[in-house]
Image: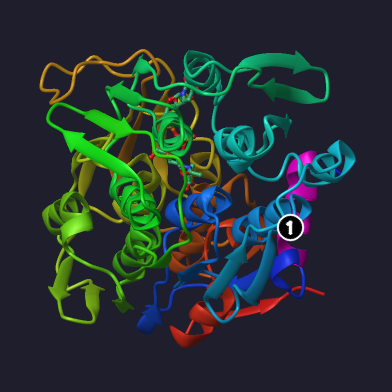
């Protein structure tokens, strides 16, 4: 069994999926209402932040996704007592007895999430050392951690790379630092926040990421007693404090999940009300959705995304850091673009390998060409990037059913949408990987009237 399938199986088990393959009879518009809970990319970090408090934290709107189960297990083996459940959406995290975990226990969870790297700062503050196993996460390029390790060193940590993982100590404690990131990395910004809040003195972080999930993490840390200010020009100032309390927080909604279901509504010609979605964090997506010919109603309770009839139009997109168009939005939207009349171009500038999923679309009849070295396009809003690749999608093309294997989280959701859009039957295997980041996607497909069943 390859490691991708192993990861998928583990993720499926964690959330209790019946099997790892579903068979979909496509061609039906998805219609109905679904709940969007807290963002995977905030909830998992807020859970780690609980390690920094002296008292219990309460996190609400937690999604029942495999990444939350992985982080919960990692926290538990470090002595955090967790009550409540992802199923009910509320977790209480009590860090009173934080202790070192055995490396074998950490190892057993390794390969399934990249979050362990964010345990470093909190564990260094609590215990004086941290061990980080091999990092997993989606296979969407090399995804190095050099910015994280450089930031930790700037705080005074000593980093030892071992064959089994990374051992980090802080023999002289952690002191505030002046750090400038080479790129506004989401994870490295979180690393600096989670480490700087209790480091001695002031930390200045330049070229920080300012995604809404980062702002929500700052809100969590402020509730805990931290002093953090977001200054103009991507600069964050942190004044270290001696101690922090637990927090009580309702997580920001998952804008990646909302955009994914929006793309499913557009591709299948349906209408989906995403309860909990909000306009302000999705403005960039909403503009593109409208330009393609999709429609939306913004209501107090959420956003309805629908296909209003008529032809979809092509679009040119460049993924970017916030407030640009998120890299996580491009995969689901590309499926809808296969149904637009004309040629669309998606420039991926954040990751070096995030178009692997399009092979499956091509197999289903889509016309998509990937340019691994990007395209020379004089009308670019952002300059060409070193990592850049481009996908050129010409539509509309009818999609037909096929056998698909989920390659990663967002690519996997795109496969689901493609199978739901296609005429005929598709079988989608390794759907456990989708459970890494989409809470109750099976129940939601049922609610939206999808015609599917689990393979034996
Ligand atoms: N990078 C480095 N060195 C580092 C860190 C990052 O070169 O030390 C590079 C990466 O290789 C990548 C770029 O910087 O090319 C951006 O990476 P970033 O650190 O911003 O991303 P991340 O923190 O690893 C988070 C989300 C991703 C999301 C990105 C961008 C989590 C757990 N993951 O990743 O989410 O795509 O930010 O917004 O928060 C997903 O949800 O499917 C997903 C992949």
Provide the residue span drawn in magenta. Answer: 3-13
Q: Which residue is label 1 attached to?
A: 76
Q: Is residue 385 above or below residue 418?
A: above
Please state the horizontal and vertical placement of residue 430, each as a whole percent of the image. 70, 56
Near-viewer residue (424 or 125) = 125
Residue 8 sits inside the magenta stretch? yes
Near-viewer residue (67 or 265) = 67
Q: Secondary structure at mark 1?
A: helix
Tell me if 405 is positioned left or right of 307 in this view: right
Quadrant including the C terminus: bottom right
Tell me if 302 is positioned left or right of 54 in this view: left
Q: Residue at x 54, y 72 (%)?
A: 441
Q: Quadrant of residue 381?
A: top left
Residue 104 sits inside the magenta stretch? no
Please state the horizontal and vertical placement of residue 437, each as a whole percent of the image. 54, 58
Q: Is residue 87 above or below residue 109?
A: below
Residue 396 in sight from this viewpoint: no
Q: State the predominant SS element of the stretch in magenta.
A: helix
Tell me if 377 is positioned left or right of 364 in this view: left
């Amino acid at each position: 069994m390859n490691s991708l399938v192993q990861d998928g199986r583990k993720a499926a088990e964690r959330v209790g999926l019946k099997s790892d393959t579903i068979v979909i009879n496509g061609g039906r518009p998805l219609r109905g209402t679904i709940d969007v809970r807290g963002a995977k990319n905030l909830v998992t970090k807020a859970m780690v932040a609980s390690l920094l408090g002296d008292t219990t934290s309460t996190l609400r709107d937690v999604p029942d996704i495999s990444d939350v189960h992985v982080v919960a297990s990692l926290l538990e083996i470090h002595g955090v007592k967790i009550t409540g459940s992802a199923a009910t959406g509320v977790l209480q995290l009590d860090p009173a007895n934080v202790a070192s975990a055995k490396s074998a226990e950490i190892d057993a969870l390794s390969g399934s999430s990249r979050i362990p790297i964010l345990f470093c700062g909190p564990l260094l503050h609590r215990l004086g050392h941290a061990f980080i196993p091999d990092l997993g996460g989606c296979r969407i390029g090399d995804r190095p951690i050099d910015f994280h390790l450089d930031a930790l060193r700037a705080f005074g940590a000593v980093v030892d790379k071992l064959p089994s993982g990374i051992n980090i100590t802080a023999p002289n404690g952690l002191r505030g630092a002046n750090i400038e990131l080479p790129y506004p990395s989401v994870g490295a910004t979180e690393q600096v926040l989670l480490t700087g809040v209790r480091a001695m003195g002031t930390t200045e972080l330049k070229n920080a990421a300012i995604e809404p999930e980062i702002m929500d993490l700052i809100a969590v840390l402020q509730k805990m007693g931290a002093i953090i200010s977001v200054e103009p020009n991507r600069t964050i100032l942190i004044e270290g404090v001696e101690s922090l309390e637990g927090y009580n927080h309702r997580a920001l909604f998952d804008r990646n999940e909302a955009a994914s279901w929006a793309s499913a509504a557009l591709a299948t010609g349906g209408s989906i009300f995403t309860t909990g979605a909000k306009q302000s964090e999705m403005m960039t997506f909403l503009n593109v959705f409208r330009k393609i010919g999709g429609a939306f109603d913004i209501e107090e309770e959420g956003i309805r995304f629908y296909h209003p009839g008529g032809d979809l139009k092509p679009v040119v997109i460049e993924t970017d850091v916030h407030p640009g168009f998120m890299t996580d939005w491009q995969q689901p939207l590309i499926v809808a673009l296969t149904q637009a009349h004309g040629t669309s171009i998606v420039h991926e500038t954040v990751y070096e390998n995030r178009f692997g999923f399009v092979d499956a679309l091509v197999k289903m009849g889509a016309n998509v060409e990937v340019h691994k070295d990007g395209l020379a396009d004089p009308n670019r809003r952002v300059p060409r990037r070193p990592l850049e690749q481009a996908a050129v999608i010409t539509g509309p093309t009818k999609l037909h059913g096929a056998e698909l294997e989920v390659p990663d989280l967002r690519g996997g959701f795109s496969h689901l949408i493609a199978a739901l859009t296609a005429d005929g039957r598709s079988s989608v295997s390794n759907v456990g990987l989708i459970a890494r980041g989409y809470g109750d996607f099976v129940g939601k497909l049922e609610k939206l009237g999808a015609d599917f069943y689990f393979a034996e």
